[in-house]
Amino acid sequence: MKHSSELSWLPCFCILFCGLLVSSQLDYRFYDNACPTLTKLVRNGVWSAIANETRMAASILRLHFHDCLVDGCEGSVLLDDTSTIKGEKNALPNRNSVRGFEVIDAIKANVEKACPDTVSCTDILTLAAREAVFLTGGQFYAVPLGRRDGLSASQSAANEQLPTPLEPLENITAKFTAKGLEMKDVVVLSGAHTIGFAQCFTFKSRLFDFGGSGKPDPALDTSLLQNLQVTCPNQNDSNTKLAALDTTFDKFDNNYYKNLISNSGLLQSDQALMGDNRTAEMVMYYSKYPFLFPRDFGVSMVKMASTGVLTGQNGQIRKNCRAVN
Ligand code: HEM
Ligand SMILES: *[C@@H]1O[C@H](CO)[C@@H](O)[C@H](O)[C@H]1NC(C)=O
Ligand SMILES: *[C@@H]1O[C@H](CO)[C@@H](O)[C@H](O)[C@H]1NC(C)=O
Ligand SMILES: *[C@@H]1O[C@H](CO)[C@@H](O)[C@H](O)[C@H]1NC(C)=O
Ligand SMILES: *[C@@H]1O[C@H](CO)[C@@H](O)[C@H](O)[C@H]1NC(C)=O
């Protein structure tokens, strides 16, 4: 690192001390000198992926969330399985569900051409998620960079640490607070479901026999219910069909919160935000003031993207996002 070499004449304790103060932190200008075209390369890559398939914006945003929530943002979700690593791609919440790996690979290849061995895969994913939000109409937010890629991945950690739509809000909140996030971040970041899709099996339990009642979930609007029963008929072969998470599924707006107020959240975990007075109050607030959601979303994203990061000399800059060097 630049800082360490400049200070290399100093006694060891100072290198360690200064290292802690200077190079072990994320920095908004981290790649300004080392890779000045980075932002443009990431934006172009995300733009062309979205131009080909609009949903890819949502998929990239989710991939970043799944990277960060499991042992911190260190690109672990990007690693393929090997004979020694049982990776996260095949964990229950990810298998046949998270997408966008090819997009990150393509951006990484372009970044390697411009600035070899310089930019981590997890920073590329962090920037790509920001571009996905911005390019679908959300607010631009600056993200500090300098994350390094991890050397391992854990399928069991992914199974334990990622939230599922069927667990209660309390449990989901606990998974966020374990990462230094708060209940407010759960409400704000769930607003990511303003874009994208979910497969029928992730919410089907609400449509026909909710909790063994023989009836649909009473907290689901009847006209949305009728549409969903058509999209997801009560038979196994409908499990992988898709339904939009939001009425405006390709626009990063605050309709997600408006929908929750009219009992039109798709996932049980979405609608559960209305079942607790503390979170319901925040939902009302974001539905009422459209400019507050994008602003707070950027703040919570930066917070999420700073959890459990590797900096300084820790980790590595992967050459190929799918494998440890
Ligand atoms: C609060 C707990 C959360 C739960 C239980 C949850 C669960 C889910 C589920 C089940 C899906 C559908 C997956 C599929 O059908 O294959 C989904 C999609 C999605 N999630 Fe979440 N999620 C949560 C929070 C978040 C957060 C914090 C973000 C990002 C900041 C996020 C971003 C997305 C996006 C953008 C999609 C659509 C992906 C696509 O269309 O490819 N989710 N989520
Ligand atoms: C474009 O999107 C389709 C899915 O809609 C996908 O199968 C294809 O690989 C994508 N092509 C490129 C060049 O990204
Ligand atoms: C919620 O968390 C509690 C305590 O960790 C656990 O006992 C319970 O099984 C969890 N519920 C669900 C549905 O995952
Ligand atoms: C549907 O899937 C469930 C669980 O995998 C299985 O028990 C059931 O027999 C399947 N039903 C049909 C009609 O295939
Ligand atoms: C939540 O709000 C409802 C309706 O305003 C009220 O009846 C209930 O007592 C409140 N619960 C808590 C725990 O504050």
Image (spheres, rainbow, N blue to C red):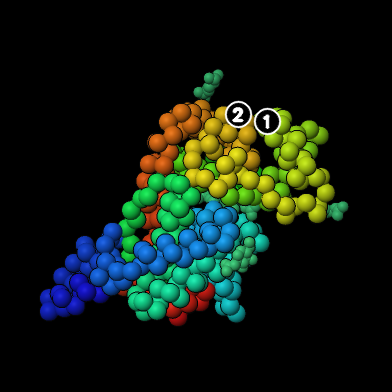
Residue at point 25% right, 70% down? 33
> Is the residue marked by circle 2 packed among few (<14), some (14-19), or many (20+) residues within 10 Å?
few
The residue labelled by disc 2 is 262
- Front residue of this view, candidates 263 and 182: 263
- Front residue of this view, candidates 167 and 43: 43
Find the residue positioned furthest to the left. 10
Q: Is residue 2 above or below residue 310?
A: below
Q: Secondary structure at mark 2?
A: loop
Q: Amino acid at mark 2?
A: Ser
Q: Amino acid at mark 1?
A: Asp
Whether disc 2's CB lies below 8 Å from ligand 5 is answered no
> Is the residue marked by circle 1 packed among few (<14), some (14-19), or many (20+) residues within 10 Å?
some
Residue 189 is labelled as none
Q: Give the quarter of the image for residue 123.
A: bottom left
Residue 43 picture location, percent across and down: 42, 62
Please indicate, yes or no, whether residue 251 appears anywhere in the rendered image.
Answer: yes
Answer left or right for 118 relative to 198: left
Residue 21 picture location, percent across and down: 21, 62
Residue at point 49% right, 28% down? 284
Who comes first in sequence, dot 1 or dot 2?
1
The residue labelled by disc 1 is 221
Q: Quadrant of the N terminus?
A: bottom left
Q: CA distance from mark 1 to mark 2?
A: 7 Å
Q: How many marks?
A: 2
- Front residue of this view, candidates 38 and 317: 38
Q: Is residue 204 above or below residue 316?
A: above
Q: Are marks 1 and 2 in contact (CB under 8 Å)?
A: yes
Residue at point 46% right, 28% down? 288
